[in-house]
Structures are given as C-alpha cells and as structure tokens.
Image (cartoon, rainbow, N blue to C red):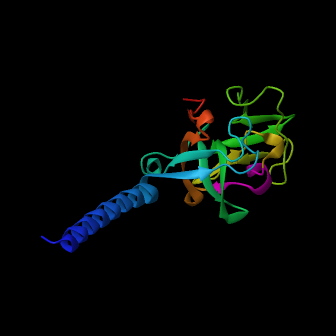
C-alpha cells in the first residue's frame, strides 16, 4: 500500500469520526440539552449576567413546568429573543401582587428560598396592584428573581406553553459558578 493510500485512509477515518461526533452533538443540541446565556440582571443573585446554563429540552415531553422551575422561553414581547425566568403560576392558578408580595391562590407565596426578604415585588402594566389574574390553561406566569430589574409577566402577561424551550438544570460557565439548579418547592 502506497503512502497516498495510507494518507487517504487516515483522511477518510478522520472524516468519519468528525461526522459521527458532529451528528451526536447535533442530536443532543436539537433534542436533549441546549446551552443558554443569561443576559442581564433579571435573575440576580441566583444567576449572574453572562453565565451559561444547560437547559433540558426533553423533559417537556414528560412533564410540564411547575411552580419554582427556572425555564427558558421565547420572550412574548420579542419572540426572537430567549428569556430565563422562574415559574410563579401555572394554568388555573390565581396570581396577585399586593403590598410588595406575591399571592398564589389567595396565599402569600413563600419565596425565601430564592429571594432576599427585603426584595419587594411590585405590580406592572399587565397585573396591577391588588389585581388578581387567573393563569389560563396552557400558559405560565413567570418572574425574574431580581424583581426590580426584570421584564416579566407583570409587564407583558402570560407565557404560552408553545414558547417554552426547556427547564434550566445546570450552570456550567464560568467554572467558579458551577451549580445545579434546584426547584425550591420540590
């Protein structure tokens, strides 16, 4: 076997390995897990600006997002952008913002696991102070953890199920901030 034949075989072998690796990556990226970058301070202090989170796409085929889950979704005011927020209400839940607190189904929501007690939740354009809204079936009410810096359901309304991309499960970048994302209500 000549030198050109050996080079050709190494090239073909390398190309096959590269195509296999690319195929595996593509399947994982499209169907299973996808990285997303946190942009801005709407989820601070639980998520920092420019952190990367790994988002589980497949979980939506087995269960719907629930209270406390951190989800990535197409932003209702700008569907070409992705937002990351915490689920505060699901279909059938009644939400009210009053005196700086969030009420879920007539009970003050305990958010102490992810919010500093000094943080106040103010009403917005969509949900006024003391006004109760019922989340329609197939929709979610979401809020950022940094209530004063978050554009969320208080301003632009409910997130349709079809806009939800996945549930965030792991912060992987920067390495000093690696952590799993837990639902405080589980």
- Residue 154 part of the magenta segment: yes
Q: What residue span does the magenta drawing correspond to?
A: 151-159
The furthest residue to the left:
1
Name the residue: 20% across, 68% down: 6
- Is residue 32 at least partly visible in the picture? yes
Front residue (pair 137, 22)? 22
Front residue (pair 40, 102)? 40
- Is residue 92 at least partly visible in the picture? no
Position above or below: 115 against 82: above
Name the residue: 65% across, 44% down: 51
The location of residue 42, given as percent across then percent down, is 75, 45
Front residue (pair 20, 105)? 20
Position above or below: 117 against 45: above
Q: Is residue 61 left or right of residue 125?
A: left
Q: Is residue 71 left or right of residue 64?
A: right
Quadrant containing the C terminus is top right
Front residue (pair 142, 74)? 74
The furthest residue to the front:
3
Name the residue: 57% across, 35% down: 178
Q: Quadrant of residue 49?
A: top right
The location of residue 164, given as percent across then percent down, is 57, 55
The location of residue 97, given as percent across then percent down, is 80, 40
């Amino acid at each position: 076997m000549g030198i050109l034949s050996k080079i050709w075989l190494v090239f073909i072998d390398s190309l096959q390995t590269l195509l296999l690796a690319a195929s595996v990556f593509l399947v994982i990226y499209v169907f299973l897990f996808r990285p997303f970058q946190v942009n801005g301070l709407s989820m601070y202090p639980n998520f920092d600006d420019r952190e990367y989170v790994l988002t589980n796409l497949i979980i939506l085929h087995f269960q719907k997002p629930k209270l406390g889950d951190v989800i990535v979704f197409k932003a209702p005011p700008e569907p070409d952008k992705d937002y990351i927020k915490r689920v505060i209400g699901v279909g059938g839940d009644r939400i009210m913002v009053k005196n700086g607190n969030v009420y879920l189904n007539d009970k003050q929501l305990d958010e102490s696991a992810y919010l500093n007690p000094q943080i106040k939740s103010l009403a917005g354009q969509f949900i006024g102070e003391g006004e109760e809204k019922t989340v329609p079936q197939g929709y979610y009410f979401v809020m950022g953890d940094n209530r004063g810096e978050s554009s969320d359901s208080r301003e632009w309304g409910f997130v349709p199920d079809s806009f939800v991309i996945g549930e965030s499960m792991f912060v992987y970048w920067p390495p000093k901030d690696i952590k799993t994302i837990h639902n405080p209500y589980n």
